[in-house]
Amino acid sequence: EDVPARCQSEIKNIIETAYQANLVGQLEERTRSQPRTMIFFKWYGYNVDTSISVPAYCRKFKYVKTIGVSVFRKRESTGRHFGPLRATLRVLYNINDMTDDSAFIRVGELEHHWRRNKLFIFDDTLLHQSFNGADETRYCLFVDVIRPTLFNHLLSLVVTGIRFCMASVNYVF
């Protein structure tokens, strides 16, 4: 409820599209041999060519700047890390159902368990770490939205500028 209604609408549309496009099924087929994978459809407002087809993610969004999916096979985790951009908020939505509490994200001292709540929004510049200690694969939408402010257009321009600056090193992310 803390983000504008139009931003909420874009986020809900992305989530609904994941189910309509059978995103988990498409990802399972293409990422089966990889323990941990990130697939991007949109990166800082720019459409990314990918082997998975979700045409609805290619449209222009007002608030959404990045759309990706993080796939963690069983017993996978990230190291502690933080994001580079304070102009956005990170929206995570676990697409599939998790059956236990061993799949979670830790942001500072807070642990968010995917079994209990599929949606989590946080400031990506805070130190965080993702875990999947479960015996099942975890599929999590990874969406960056413009931080709610009176200056949305200005922040959107900042994100576009960063995309141009980071274009040659986006493979790192």
Image: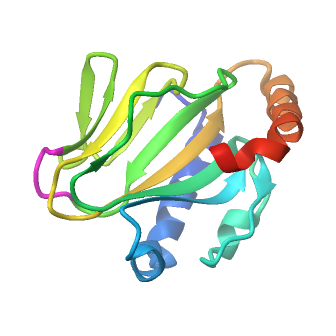
Choose between 10 and 146: the one closer to the eye. Answer: 146
Rendered image coloring scheme: rainbow
Q: Image quadrant for the C terminus? A: top right
Q: Quadrant of residue 135?
A: bottom left
152 left or right of 90 in image: right
* Residue range (magenta): 98-102
127 left or right of 102 in image: right
Residue 100 covered by magenta stretch: yes
- Picture coordinates of residue 82 (x, y %)? 51, 25
Q: Quadrant of residue 156?
A: top right
- Up/down of 68 relative to 2, above or below: below
Choose between 121 and 53: the one closer to the eye. Answer: 53
User: What residue is rendered at 84% in x and 27% in y?
Assistant: 158
85 left or right of 27 in image: right
- Picture coordinates of residue 153 (x, y %)? 85, 29
- Taken as a whole, is the magenta stretch helix, strand or loop? loop
- Up/down of 38 relative to 106, above or below: below
- Up/down of 90 relative to 167, above or below: above
Choose between 164 and 160: the one closer to the eye. Answer: 164
Numbered-mark total: 0
User: What residue is rendered at 49% in x and 68% in y?
Assistant: 18
User: What residue is rendered at 89% in x and 40% in y?
Assistant: 164
- Picture coordinates of residue 109 (x, y %)? 26, 16
User: What residue is rendered at 48% in x and 65% in y?
Assistant: 16
Q: Quadrant of residue 64?
A: top right
- Picture coordinates of residue 21 (x, y %)? 51, 78
- Up/down of 72 relative to 102, above or below: below
